[in-house]
Image (cartoon, rainbow, N blue to C red):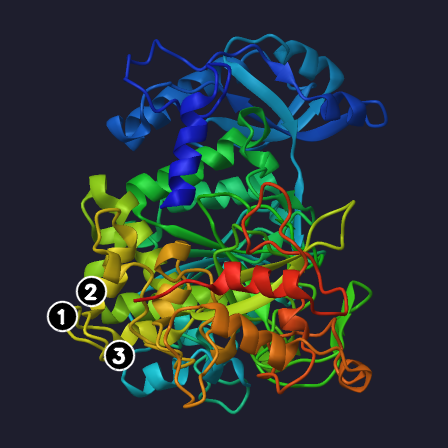
Amino acid sequence: MQRIMRALIALLVLPVLAGLLQFGPFAGPSQLSAGGGVIDPEVWEALQTSSEVEVIVQLVQPSGPLEEMTLDEFAQFSETKKANVLAKLAPVDFTLTAALEGLPGFAGRITASGALALEGHPDVLSVILDKKLYLALGESVPLIHADQVHAGGVTGAGIEVAVLDTGVDPEHDDLEASILSEACFLPQDECGPPEHPALDDNGHGTMVTGVLTSNGNNNIAPPGVAPDVGIHAWKIAGADGEANFSGVAAALRKALFEPPKGNPIEFLNLSLTDRRVHASGQCEYQDPEDNAVIDFALTGLRLFRGTILFAASGNSGHKWGMGYPACHPLVVSVGGVYDEDIGPSGFGTVCQDATTRPDKVTCWSQSSPDLDLLAPNHAIVTTAPGNQAFAVLGTSVAPPHAAGVAALLLEARPDLNPTTAPENQRDEAIDRLVSRLKLTGAPVFYNVTDPPPDHTIVKSRTTPRVDARVALLTDDGADFDGDGLTNGQELDGAASPKAALGTLFANPLAADTDQDGCADGRELGTNQSTGGQRNPSYFWDFADMPDINNVRNRAIGVTDVGRVVARYGRNDALETASINRHSDPLSQPPASGYHPAFDRGPALPGTNDWNVRAPDGAIALTDIVAVVRQFGHTCL
């Protein structure tokens, strides 16, 4: 909900020039976002070397709140503006490639004289380049406990997912029964035959679809996360694996205005990225003149359809920014983890991991503080064209894991389905659903370094890895983990600012993993005074040292500091040499002697005690004070 609120606040403070919807008092269709035909400098630059370039022409929009208009009203308004603009373009100067009916824009190839004709046009918000998206490419189902959910009879039946990718092999034995429809959003010569317009000529889409819904019954590929989910195969990328933004917009438009069978699609899966790094809170294509068309489509899908888009975070390895559209606040971003220990591994020339283990974040998986979820993304065996199965890696296979878990949850709990909620409540229903996926995920802890120029600052980050057992929580009145709080209190309480303190950030799938006397939910919280910002997977992180009777009192005092110094404050050369300080310091509970988890530099100016500097090789009193300040609070 916080990310959505930030998005709405951003819309509120944008000036009228912004092409995004203004969520203020509705003043009727005459109150418009200002036009002016702004031609992006990149368009002029591209026209210096080419006689025509591919662009998206973005149109002005009503400035009233979208939720107070019907889709038909908005579509009629957009089509009127579109006709006015197209009438100003000579056929020699513009070739329409995507009409994007109902959306505030259209795509095509434009010449320099065509661009001049649109410059200053009152119905044109901006003209931008039609940018590109690229592909973001055994043990994964058990890791997320989907096999346990399948055994309980929950397989995603009745839930529909549109996979926006390179298409699908519709005759693959493991997929054929799941394909509900096909569509292609490319030029006709890049689509399949009429009977199978989304025929996969790359392989990526078939692999992604298999992770989501392979039936696993033919000794080809293992079962997918949700083997009975229905698939709409929408081809937005061709054999080269590249997709235009206009193709994405056309697919989103179909989900918004023309969903197959007339029913809203629960989820969209997009395993492509722009291969860029968009820092937290700086998703470039949220800018009103950059991508108003897609931004409107995402907003409309949320408000009118209750449809959720899952997208891959990207494969560049950067930990301070994600690719687009994963960085967008209305998109559920998904990064990747290993699903087993396979020894050293990596992603081409991007990076190498010296060690691997289940739930370790893969070095290539992009992330930021805004990353929503993690899921397996390495050596995942899945379907491939020609009735084959391949092992694939990359964050491409992370979103279908997350979408599959969401599908299992909605089959088990149809009352949580945002698409069937009252129209004015679909926004909130999406928040509740995504909140459940996050709160029931297994917490994954990893260290990241700051972006350039200072790569030496190490920060800890926690992101939940999806856990399909959320679908087993079918009774909100039950107490799954026996901690005295009902499932409903633990899950729905976290989304409510009025919730009782005891229900915040709780997880009914796990009570006290490290048995330190402090509930996992409290340790994952954000409020240090109530036990937040600790690691529930390792008992010693609390720094509440056992006394001579091996008893912890769940509070930190002088005696605890003394015991920390006595146990970890030595800097023995032999012990230090046996520990790689650049490896995961949380991999094993430490014995006596030096351990980098307690080697803390001082907090940076303007940051809290969670953001501490990297180990310097020796433990001093300042390190212990930092540990106490970070973990030194009670969870009572």
Q: Nearer the viewer, mark 2 or mark 3?
A: 3
For disc 3, the neighbor class at 10 Å (few under 14, some 14 to 19, many from 20) is some
Per the rendering, the mark at residue 477 is: 1
Could you tell me the amino acid type at mark 3?
A: Asp
Could you tell me the amino acid type at mark 2?
A: Gly
How far across and how far down the image is residue 39, in percent?
Answer: 66, 18
How far across and how far down the image is residue 358, in percent?
Answer: 57, 80
> Looking at the image, which residue is at 28% across and 12% down?
27
Q: Tally the marks.
A: 3
Image position of 123 with respect to 331: above or below:
above
Q: Out of 68 and 189, give the one closest to the viewer.
A: 68
How far across and how far down the image is residue 610, in percent?
Answer: 55, 56
What residue is pinned by disc 3? 481
> Looking at the image, which residue is at 59% across and 13% down?
37
- As measured in the structure, the alpha-carbon distance from the residue carrying label 3 to the one carrying label 1 is 12 Å
Residues under numbered marks 2 and 3 in contact, where contact means CB atoms less than 8 Å apart:
no
What residue is pinned by disc 2? 488
* Quadrant position of the C terminus in the picture: bottom left
